[in-house]
Image (spheres, rainbow, N blue to C red):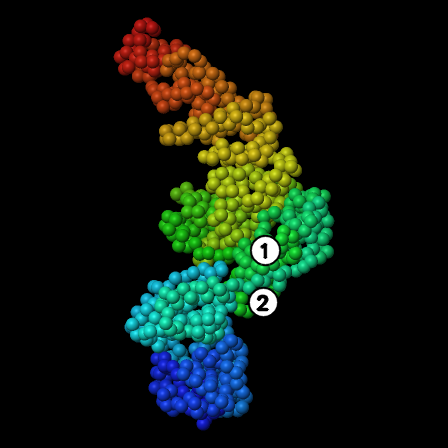
């Protein structure tokens, strides 16, 4: 309508012919403003006498309705004013004013300004309405700077912005609200070539001239990138299509349906087809036209600077510096084998590994793409998966490489691709965020959430920032209970710990060397607090040196990606998940991955932790992580293992999956580092299996006795070592003396007891009692594991569940009251009474008294 008005100013002698109906907001505007136009009805036009045809807002012959009959007239002069893209159905004329703008109303505004044609305020407002409508309030991808300049000019001519808002966003009627609800309820979202597209299909009893408005409302309400609405009205099918992304050009789809439009907004009217048939046509066309363009070959760099697997770390580092690059592909005969970064070489040189070859430390877990890979695939790898460098491979050979810089340079020059990467996601060093506040409320007790909020508030009062980190965050995402609170403070962790203890009336214990502290609350809840720190290692397997740092560097120092997440506790960001290392994906995929290539060189104990997590969580070690474990074994980084290795072995043996973890250690040839003679043989495997069964059985008894399951498994693991070898292992692992003595004593007594209770012939309960009474709970379970036959296992079971619980009816005081003088004989008498009670000779106090009088007369 606005374009027809504008064209009439250029062609005042022409007749206005409008072949369609007016939408409600347009009718309201014309009524309220008093704008009147002298329209000529189509029926009154003798098309054979038309000598000039001025067509606005389209160039397609199929879009001008009955007026296409004029096209047969001899000498017809056609003038065209349009902003839509070219189509094979386009008309051609003596005047073709076609401009790449968001609206034909913009085009006419430009013409008026260029020709100094004045318009009144009402006409300016109508043109402004048209621009707002056609550009989706300047949000469609087809919007150009020209549209904004045209709007500025129209405002100078008196366009009323308040009226624009009123008529572009009119209030919906009750019927329209119901129709919008039906439109939303009938919608289905399909993923076509990785792109989500929503399709809605409804049937209406009458024609709705506000259908396009409802489609736009639907798109805004649901924040959709692409929407196609199909409606049956009267005897026709109407298709309204909208898109905000360049991958979905709805103009092409509408054109194939006999309609038209541009990439972001289009429509079509279909006759003699059912609603279902048109929906099928739409789906077919979506699969035909929604194909993200191939971009890899276009943006890759070639030829590639690379090195061979036998290049030394020192040589690789020199190449990285010479060409000022951060990553080098490792290539053999055009096939990429791995990648090594400047960070890897710098760490390796720091640890005096400069003469090692890069094959030992290169990253081998990475994805490649083909030259036909799309921008979406490249974005997924670089932005979502955090792979900084992508090799481009064709028929097995690397032909190019795409870096993070290549991608961002492309995006910076193509604004149409930026919406998906808007905000923080553009920054590759920014954490991946997710709000965990709701999950915390569901998974944690109210008091726990309150404690975490208090921690955040106290930190803020101190001028610091607090985060929950590590296993607590990991297990929260896995929906597992974990109340070990590890808090990291960006600031001074020790002064924060004092402030928290003061506020919550708790006790604080400070560790100045590591800038850490422990706060114990009145209800015995423990909170471990650390200053955000980085750790560096002066040589392989050394204890870390600690410096203050940021949360990102604090997380980078951690062992595995799944443990390198944090949750904001600050009041303004409470519950926001911080994930710099794609940790959520590794958690979802069940993968244990190290964060950097020299992780095990710096701290070999992480290897044992990796295997413990793998078995406990039923995860898998990443291929690159397995490769680095093998490298660490080959380098023999376990010479100075000491007490820290003992701690890791203890943790492994305390797990339910201890046997599987030990078998995994054996697969990686790690057991000989505990002792050269320690290896898994069938007999030892059987002993460990039986020890694990004995532990499970004992736990089900729910006895109040204090015991340690890891000691049982350590006794089983070392059962084939000689006593001298066991002492060597204890010395090498710096096992505390109390445990070393315990291991030696219990294994000697357990082996002796196992042999005794498995002798031929049956044993009296009292004999079993004598054999087993000096063993600890751990020794008893190890004895059960050492028994080859069920007879011995049953004897231990009987002792634990019955015999050890049995008490004499008489005690020392009873003996004194009976007149027996105190002395060494008491032990003999009580032992005899216990044997008689266990063997069934005495069943009550009187029978024990009778036995004493008989065998120990006064």
Q: 698 left or right of 347?
A: left
Res. 369 mark: 1
Judge by depth and name the residue closer to the eye, 834 or 567: 567
- Give the answer, above or below, for where 765 lies relative to 36: above
* Residue 540 shows in this picture: yes
Where residue 69 sits in the image (x, y, percent)?
Answer: 43, 85
Q: Residue at x 71, y 47 (%)?
A: 311
Q: Counting other residues with Cα less than 10 Å from the Cα at mark 2, is it few (<14), some (14-19), or many (20 or more)?
A: few
- Give the answer, above or below, for where 255 lies relative to 443: below
Judge by depth and name the residue closer to the eye, 593 or 39: 39
Where residue 465 sits in the image (x, y, percent)?
Answer: 50, 55
Question: Helix, strand, or loop for circle 2?
Answer: helix
**Which residue position is annotated with label 2?**
412
Q: Residue at x 44, y 92 (%)?
A: 49
- Give the answer, above or below, for where 828 lies relative to 280: above
Where residue 162 sits in the image (x, y, percent)?
Answer: 40, 81
Where is the C terminus found, in terms of image quarters? top left
Q: Residue at x 31, y 13 (%)?
A: 840
């Amino acid at each position: 309508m606005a374009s027809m008005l504008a064209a009439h100013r250029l062609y005042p002698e022409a007749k206005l012919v409008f072949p369609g109906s007016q939408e409600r907001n347009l009718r309201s505007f014309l009524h309220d403003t008093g704008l009147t136009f002298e329209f000529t009805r189509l029926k009154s036009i003798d098309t054979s006498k038309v000598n000039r045809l001025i067509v606005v807002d389209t160039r397609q012959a199929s879009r001008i309705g009955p007026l296409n009959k004029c096209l047969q007239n001899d000498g017809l002069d056609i003038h065209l004013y349009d902003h839509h893209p070219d189509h094979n159905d386009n008309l051609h004329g003596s005047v073709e004013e076609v401009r790449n703008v968001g609206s034909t109303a913009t085009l006419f505004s430009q013409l008026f300004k260029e020709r100094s044609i004045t318009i009144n305020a009402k006409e300016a407002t109508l043109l402004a309405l048209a621009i707002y409508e056609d550009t989706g309030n300047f949000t469609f991808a087809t919007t150009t700077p020209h549209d904004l300049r045209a709007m500025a000019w129209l405002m100078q001519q008196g366009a009323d912005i308040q009226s624009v808002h009123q008529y572009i966003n009119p209030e919906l009627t009750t019927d329209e609200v119901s129709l919008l609800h039906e439109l939303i309820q009938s919608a289905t979202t399909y993923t076509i070539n990785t792109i989500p597209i929503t399709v809605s299909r409804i049937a209406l009893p009458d024609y709705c001239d506000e259908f396009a408005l409802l489609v736009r409302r639907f798109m805004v309400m649901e924040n959709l990138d692409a929407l196609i609405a199909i409606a049956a009205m009267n005897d026709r099918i109407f298709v309204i299509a909208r898109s905000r992304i360049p991958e979905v050009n709805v103009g092409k789809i509408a054109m194939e349906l006999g309609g038209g439009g541009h990439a972001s907004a289009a429509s079509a009217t279909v006759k003699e087809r059912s609603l279902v048939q048109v929906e099928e046509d739409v789906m077919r066309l979506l699969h035909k036209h929604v194909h993200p363009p191939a971009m890899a070959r276009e943006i890759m760099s070639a030829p590639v600077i690379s090195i061979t697997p036998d290049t030394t770390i020192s040589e690789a580092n020199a190449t990285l510096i010479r060409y000022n690059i951060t990553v080098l592909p490792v290539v053999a005969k055009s096939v990429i084998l791995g990648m090594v970064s400047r960070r890897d070489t710098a760490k390796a040189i720091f640890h005096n590994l400069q003469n090692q070859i890069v094959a030992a430390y290169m990253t081998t877990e990475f994805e490649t793409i083909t030259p036909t890979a799309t921008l979406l695939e490249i974005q997924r790898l670089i932005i979502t998966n955090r792979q900084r460098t992508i090799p481009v491979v064709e028929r097995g050979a690397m032909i190019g490489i795409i870096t993070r810089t290549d991608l961002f340079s492309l995006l910076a020059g193509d604004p149409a691709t930026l919406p998906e990467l808007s905000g923080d996601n553009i920054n590759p060093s920014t954490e991946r965020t997710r709000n965990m506040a709701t999950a915390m409320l569901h998974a944690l007790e109210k008091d726990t959430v309150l404690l975490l909020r208090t921690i955040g508030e106290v930190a803020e009062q101190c001028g610091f920032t607090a985060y929950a980190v590590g296993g607590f965050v990991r297990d929260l995402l896995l929906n597992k209970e974990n109340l070990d609170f590890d808090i990291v403070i960006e600031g001074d962790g020790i002064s924060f710990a004092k402030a928290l203890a003061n506020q919550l009336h708790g006790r604080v214990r400070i560790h100045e060397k590591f800038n850490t502290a422990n706060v114990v609350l009145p209800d015995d809840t423990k909170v471990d607090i650390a200053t955000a720190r980085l750790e560096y290692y002066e040589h392989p397997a050394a204890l870390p040196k600690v410096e203050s740092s940021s949360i990102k560097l604090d997380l980078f120092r951690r062992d595995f990606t799944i443990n390198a997440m944090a949750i904001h506790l600050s009041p303004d960001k409470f519950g926001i998940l911080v994930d710099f290392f794609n940790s959520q994906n590794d958690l979802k995929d069940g993968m244990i991955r190290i964060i950097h290539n020299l992780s095990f060189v710096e701290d070999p104990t992480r290897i044992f932790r990796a295997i413990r997590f793998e078995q406990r969580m039923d995860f898998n070690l990443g291929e690159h992580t397995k490769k680095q474990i093998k490298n660490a074994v080959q380098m023999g980084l376990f010479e100075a293992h000491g007490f820290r290795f003992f701690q890791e072995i203890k943790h492994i043996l305390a797990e339910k999956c201890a046997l599987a973890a030990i078998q995994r250690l054996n697969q990686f040839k790690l057991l000989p580092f505990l002792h050269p003679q320690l290896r898994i043989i069938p007999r030892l495997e059987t002993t460990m299996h039986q020890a694990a069964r004995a532990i499970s059985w004992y736990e089900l008894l729910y006895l109040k006795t204090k015991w340690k399951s890891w000691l049982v498994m350590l006794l089983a693991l070392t059962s084939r070592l000689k006593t001298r070898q066991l002492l060597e292992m204890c010395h090498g692992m710096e096992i505390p003396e109390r445990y070393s003595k315990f291991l030696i004593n219990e294994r000697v007594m357990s082996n002796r007891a196992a042999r005794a209770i498995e002798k031929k012939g049956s044993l009296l309960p009292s004999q079993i009692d004598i054999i087993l009474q000096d063993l600890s709970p751990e020794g008893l379970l190890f004895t059960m594991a050492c028994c080859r036959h069920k007879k011995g296992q049953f004897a231990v079971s009987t002792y634990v569940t019955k015999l050890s619980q049995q008490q004499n009816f008489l005690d020392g005081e009873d003996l004194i009251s009976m007149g027996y003088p105190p002395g060494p004989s008491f032990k003999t008498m009580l032992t005899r009474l216990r044997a008689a009670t266990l063997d069934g000779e005495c069943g009550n106090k009187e029978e024990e008294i009778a036995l004493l009088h008989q065998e120990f007369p006064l």
